[in-house]
């Protein structure tokens, strides 16, 4: 009630009067013995929409409220058309709402980011209205659009038009692999001046990657005859650009991260330097060669396996057949490539090849592959396999998804390298046996399962490979992994308080007690507390956790284990090994 | 047929291939070649045969030259010059050199981002060099692109409109008039700005119908700039090579109301377009299928005509209705599809074909009887309200073997190839003379046939083309001045400058071009700049005419 009065102090006097009358009426009515129908309750969220940077009013703003179950995250598509409001000349708004409950309010305006109330990454603060507290007045801070722009130039200082520029959002405070896997990229092209622009960005951390080909190399290759009778290209024209990260590096880990606040504008110019283009020779499967020309018509598809789980940069390499029947793929730069070709039986063959600056490698589809081919089996499920159950192999060094496949009963082929899980793919290797498998470079991986919120991976058993917990070491050649899948995740709900009051908008984190142990669960689950301090973390993999809440804690570097450990002592141990719904309250710590 | 086509194609020069790829006369020209081939006793006599490029030159030599900006005359550095399978970038002075060069008729191509090697809409700019041109330094020209920039702001409050697609449509002449070709497209940024690099030419800019939100909210109405102020021809923006023009567009915006449209029959997917009063047609790209053949559109206040097309097993069907939106949602709008009308084609042969003229028996033996397909018959919509894009309708064969046009109400012009062994002597639709007039299909009409009289009483034309007194592999255009279903006949000379054609009797204007140059030959003013190169030739049945043409040079085409 105290909170309610404090809030109402910010209301307009008319609203206070109306509310007072309403409450007074309610009191009188409840005191009477005559049963009469109570007047319909009025619920509303009022407030002012301001620029988060300078506090100035946001005119011509729009708001929308959506009733949700607790724990709803922003970013989901909002309900449309109802419970909306526009700001007035003083940038104030009134959202009249039909019922009590937790309302997620989203605001947008021209030149501003579309945001939820107190949004941090994908988390927002839900506004809880009750019969006792039917209205609320808030200050809604909206971030102005941020911008990253730049010019892409070539070795002669000329602008490069039509370069593909990807903008990758870097989630610095995310430890969970599943969350990392859904990080997408925005793509644009440079204009005739070589300029690109991402002009409606949310505050956050970003990296920029450029993919382009030297125009003269593309033009020179395109015009060459396919008979191979033309003289070889001049080496100065037979060049290519490596995918290049701002400020001009090929290694994604050396890329500079641009940190943008609301309204920031940063420039990121990228200069591309040509390197000698490498040729890759592909020997098609032999029986295909024999009947080539009529029905089979195999043609290889080359895709660079990029390390950043970005949408594959389109390849502008040219492919022609040489006198020996091999496919000559030119215009490549060093890197890992996936080569796919139709076999004589119509089956897709896939191979991985490391292309280096040293020479022109040959991919032979008739000899054994140096890649690890791993097949997946699932046990532990009593029911039929769901349609979508993604197994992903993650590079433990950088926590990037290297390859993923669908183990479920849904459409295959879905074996795919470096694409967001769940994206229908086209690289199955063993469709006839219905045992999903993928080819990856031999090495160490972590197995992660996605796609079914109620299932989780309890362990992995390997044949022909090594497995410790979820960590596997895959040798070249064939191996098999059995994934022990268990049904029944847990839900944790509770209230966070700070200095005896509900903690509003606090960062809530559920940290595995095994954090840092090889092969153990590493995923930290998070939420943001609502206006009544409530939080809800659903579909938690059963286990032992420590629950922490931090007031105003959204600027802390959670990736750093040492930083995290400072707060663990002030947390609450939670046992979610039973896979049930558990309620636990927590006192929020100062940041 | 395939083997013969292949042979003919294989002997086309590279520049001819570029032309053929780019223009709508591919089939026509190939057939012209085929007809020519069949009509002669021996293939070596075919004046039309084209040479193979890059014949080996006996002595290795050095080829050099310079690439210049055609507007400023300054050298262009780092331009890619490709000659006869070899490639190099020009130096800072625009110069290039190939040593030990051995091809005698190499194909030349110059490329550089921001430049075009030709001003032609469909010109690829590649051309073949004659041996005599290899001895002196080559002077190759690149045309800097033009730039259309501007902003898109709301007509109501001048606020910048972001993510609006702006399209540059180029007015391109072709053998049947002019057509609009999309050459560039860009989206506005948050400041409402756009940039469209384009080749020099005549343009209009278009913005599309666009919904701001999928479910409700403002709708941005389409806009064409310059607006259509003349019923004869649309105005356009003329922009020259290297120029920049800034254009501010102000499309209107309005609150979109739901319009529920039901199609009858309910099956199939309809493409729906709309127009307001006499405004341009626009495609309603963002609509929702709500089941039972219902669509949900979003339109601001106003009165609209809705037109829809769908494909059924019996061919294309159309529907048209009107709707008025006045401050609230509208439902109960019905789009009732009706099948296209059938216009039979009746073809009669001129009795003169049964004569005993020399070669007639041979022709009858080797040439199948003409039909609407082999004559290249086509109905071209001339109705400017039809989306302002050329609508071509070819004949279709019915189950009983007869040929018909399936058309929707509107105005059309009949078009045919007018060369080769058979030509259309007369064409009528009721009392309309289709050699001179358009035909109009009224709603509910149909059944009336197009009556054609065809003849094989052709004549022939042998010619030679030179440029600056040297034989050239050039492009030849013959424009009939007697009524004809074809506004122009395109052909080409071989590397000795010779060409040979079978033509319908009549009078023609003949002109040759060193490089591909598209013109609207229906426009009498189109040939005026080249009057000194134009010759008139009369073709009589069974006779051979000869002609020598002095080709229009590249410099005259693009000074």
Image (cartoon, rainbow, N blue to C red):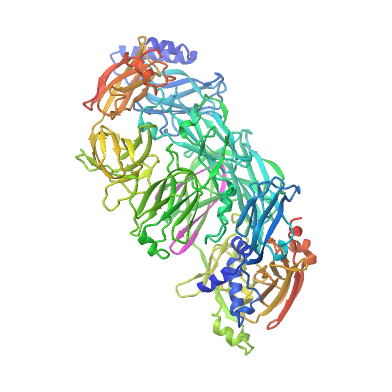
Work out whether B539 lies above or below B130.
Answer: below
Q: Nearer the viewer, residue B473 or B30?
A: B473
Q: Main secondary structure of the magenta part?
A: strand
Is B372 left or right of B137, judged from the image as shown? left
Image quadrant of residue B411?
bottom right
Q: Is residue B275 visible?
A: no
Q: Is residue A489 visible?
A: yes
Q: Nearer the viewer, residue B211 or B333?
A: B211
Is A134 left or right of A57, judged from the image as shown? left
Q: Position of residue A127 (x, y in %)?
A: 40, 21
Q: Is residue B294 magenta?
A: yes
Q: Position of residue A209 (x, y in %)?
A: 51, 36
Q: Residue at x 29, y 22 (%)?
A: A493
Q: Position of residue A391 (x, y in %)?
A: 31, 39
Q: Is residue A427 magenta?
A: no
Q: Position of residue B218 (x, y in %)?
A: 54, 37
Q: Residue at x 50, y 75 (%)?
A: B402
Q: Quadrant of the C terminus of chain A?
A: top left
Part of the protein shown in magenta:
B291-317
Image quadrant of residue B514?
bottom right
Q: Residue furthest right?
A: B532
Is B247 left or right of A534, judged from the image as shown? right
Is B101 left or right of A473, judged from the image as shown? right
């Amino acid at each position: 009630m105290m909170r309610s009065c404090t809030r109402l102090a910010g209301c307009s006097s008319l609203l206070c009067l109306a509310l007072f009358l309403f409450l007074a009426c309610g009191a009188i009515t409840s005191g009477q013995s005559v049963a009469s129908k109570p007047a319909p309750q009025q619920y509303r969220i009022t407030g002012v929409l301001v620029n988060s940077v300078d506090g100035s009013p946001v005119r011509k703003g729009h708001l929308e409220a959506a009733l949700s179950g607790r724990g709803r995250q922003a970013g989901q598509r909002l309900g449309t058309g109802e419970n909306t409001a526009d700001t007035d000349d003083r940038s104030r708004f009134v959202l009249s709402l039909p019922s009590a409950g937790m309302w997620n309010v989203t605001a947008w305006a021209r030149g501003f980011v579309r945001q939820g109330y107190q949004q941090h990454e994908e988390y927002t603060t839900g506004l809880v209205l009750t019969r006792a507290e039917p209205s609320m007045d808030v200050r809604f801070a909206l971030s102005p659009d941020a911008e990253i722009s730049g010019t892409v130039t070539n070795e002669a200082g000329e602008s490069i038009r039509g370069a593909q520029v990807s903008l990758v959002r870097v989630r610095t405070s995310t430890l969970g692999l599943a969350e990392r896997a859904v990080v997408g990229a925005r793509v644009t092209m440079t204009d005739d001046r070589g300029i690109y622009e991402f002009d409606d960005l949310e505050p956050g951390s970003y990296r920029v990657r450029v993919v382009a080909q030297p125009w003269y190399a593309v033009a020179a290759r395109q015009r060459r005859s396919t008979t191979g009778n033309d003289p070889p290209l001049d080496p100065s024209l037979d060049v290519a650009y490596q995918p290049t990260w701002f400020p001009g590096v090929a290694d994604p880990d050396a890329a500079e991260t641009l940190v943008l606040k609301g309204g920031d504008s940063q420039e990121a110019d990228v200069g591309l330097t040509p390197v000698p283009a490498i040729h890759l020779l592909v020997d098609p499967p032999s029986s295909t060669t024999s009947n080539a020309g009529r029905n089979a018509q195999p043609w290889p598809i080359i895709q660079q396996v990029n390390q950043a789980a970005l949408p594959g940069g389109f390849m502008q390499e040219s492919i022609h057949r040489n006198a020996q029947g091999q496919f000559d793929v030119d215009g490549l730069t060093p890197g890992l490539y996936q080569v796919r070709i139709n076999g004589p039986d119509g089956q897709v063959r896939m191979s991985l090849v490391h292309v280096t600056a040293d020479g022109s490698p040959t991919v032979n589809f008739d000899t054994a592959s140096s890649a690890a081919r791993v097949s997946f089996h699932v046990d532990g499920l009593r029911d039929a396999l769901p349609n979508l159950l993604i197994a992903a192999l993650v590079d433990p060094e950088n926590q990037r998804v290297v390859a993923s496949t669908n183990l479920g009963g849904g459409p295959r082929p879905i074996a795919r390298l470096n694409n967001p899980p769940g994206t229908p793919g086209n690289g199955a290797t063993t469709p006839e046996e219905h045992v999903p498998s993928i080819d990856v470079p031999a090495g160490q991986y972590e197995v992660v399962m996605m796609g079914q919120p109620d299932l989780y991976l309890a362990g992995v058993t390997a044949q022909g490979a090594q497995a410790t917990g979820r960590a596997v070491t895959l040798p070249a050649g064939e191996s098999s992994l059995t994934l022990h899948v268990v049904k029944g995740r847990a839900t944790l709900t509770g209230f966070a308080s700070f200095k005896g009051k509900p903690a509003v908008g606090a960062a809530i984190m559920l940290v595995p007690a095994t954090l840092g142990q090889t092969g153990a669960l590493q995923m930290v689950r998070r939420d943001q507390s609502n206006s009544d301090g409530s939080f809800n973390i659903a579909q938690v993999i059963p286990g032992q956790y420590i629950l922490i809440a931090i007031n105003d804690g959204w600027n802390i570097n959670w990736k750093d284990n040492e930083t995290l450990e400072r707060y663990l002592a002030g947390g609450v141990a939670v046992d979610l090994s039973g896979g049930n719904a558990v309620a636990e309250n927590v006192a929020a710590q100062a940041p | 047929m395939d083997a013969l086509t292949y042979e003919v194609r294989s002997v086309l020069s590279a520049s001819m291939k570029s032309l053929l790829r780019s223009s709508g006369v591919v089939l026509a020209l190939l057939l012209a070649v085929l007809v020519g081939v069949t009509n002669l006793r021996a293939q070596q006599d075919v004046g039309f045969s084209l040479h193979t490029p890059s014949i080996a030159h006996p002595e290795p030599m050095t080829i050099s030259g310079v690439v210049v900006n055609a507007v400023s005359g300054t050298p262009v550095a780092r331009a890619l010059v490709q000659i006869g399978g070899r490639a190099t970038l020009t130096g800072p002075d625009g110069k290039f050199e190939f040593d030990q060069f051995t091809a005698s008729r190499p194909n030349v191509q110059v490329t550089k981002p921001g430049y075009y090697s030709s001003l032609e809409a469909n010109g690829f700019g590649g051309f073949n060099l004659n041996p005599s041109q290899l001895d002196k330094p080559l002077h190759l020209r690149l045309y800097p692109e033009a730039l259309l920039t501007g902003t898109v702001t709301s007509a109501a409050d001048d606020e910048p409109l972001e993510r609006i697609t702006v399209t540059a449509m180029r007015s391109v002449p072709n053998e049947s008039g002019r057509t609009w070709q999309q050459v560039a497209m860009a989206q506005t940024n948050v400041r409402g700005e756009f940039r469209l690099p384009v080749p020099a030419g005549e343009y209009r800019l278009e913005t599309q119908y666009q919904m701001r939100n999928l479910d409700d909210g403002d709708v941005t109405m389409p806009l064409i700039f310059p607006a259509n102020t003349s019923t004869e021809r649309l105005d356009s923006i003329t922009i020259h090579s290297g120029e920049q023009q800034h254009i501010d567009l102000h499309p209107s915006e309005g609150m979109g109301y739901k319009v529920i449209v039901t199609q009858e029959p309910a099956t199939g997917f309809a493409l729906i377009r709309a127009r307001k009063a006499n405004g341009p047609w626009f495609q309603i790209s963002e609509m929702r299928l709500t089941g039972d053949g219902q669509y949900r559109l979003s339109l601001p206040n106003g009165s609209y005509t809705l037109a829809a097309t769908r494909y059924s097993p019996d061919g294309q069907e159309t529907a048209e209705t009107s709707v008025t939106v006045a401050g609230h949602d509208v439902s109960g709008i019905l789009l009732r599809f009706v099948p296209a009308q059938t216009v039979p084609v009746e073809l009669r042969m001129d009795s003169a074909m049964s004569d005993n003229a020399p070669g007639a028996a041979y022709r009858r033996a080797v040439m199948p009887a003409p039909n609407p397909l082999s004559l290249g018959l086509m109905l071209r919509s001339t109705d400017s309200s039809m989306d302002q894009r050329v609508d071509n309708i070819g004949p279709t064969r019915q189950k009983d073997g007869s040929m018909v046009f399936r058309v929707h109400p509107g105005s059309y012009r009949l078009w045919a190839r007018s060369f080769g062994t058979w030509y259309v002597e007369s064409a009528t639709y009721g009392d309309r003379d289709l050699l001179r007039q358009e035909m109009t299909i009224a709603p509910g009409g149909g059944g009336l046939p197009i009556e054609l009289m065809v003849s094989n009483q052709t004549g022939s034309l042998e010619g030679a083309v030179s440029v600056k007194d040297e034989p050239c592999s050039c492009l030849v255009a013959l424009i009939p001045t007697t009524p004809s279903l074809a506004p122009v006949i395109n052909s080409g000379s071989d590397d000795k400058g010779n060409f040979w054609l079978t033509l319908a009797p009549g009078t023609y204007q003949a002109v040759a071009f060193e490089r591909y140059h598209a013109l609207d030959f229906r426009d009498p003013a189109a040939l005026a700049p080249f009057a000194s190169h134009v010759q008139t030739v009369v073709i009589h049945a069974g006779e051979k005419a000869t002609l020598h043409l002095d080709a229009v040079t590249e410099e005259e085409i693009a000074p």
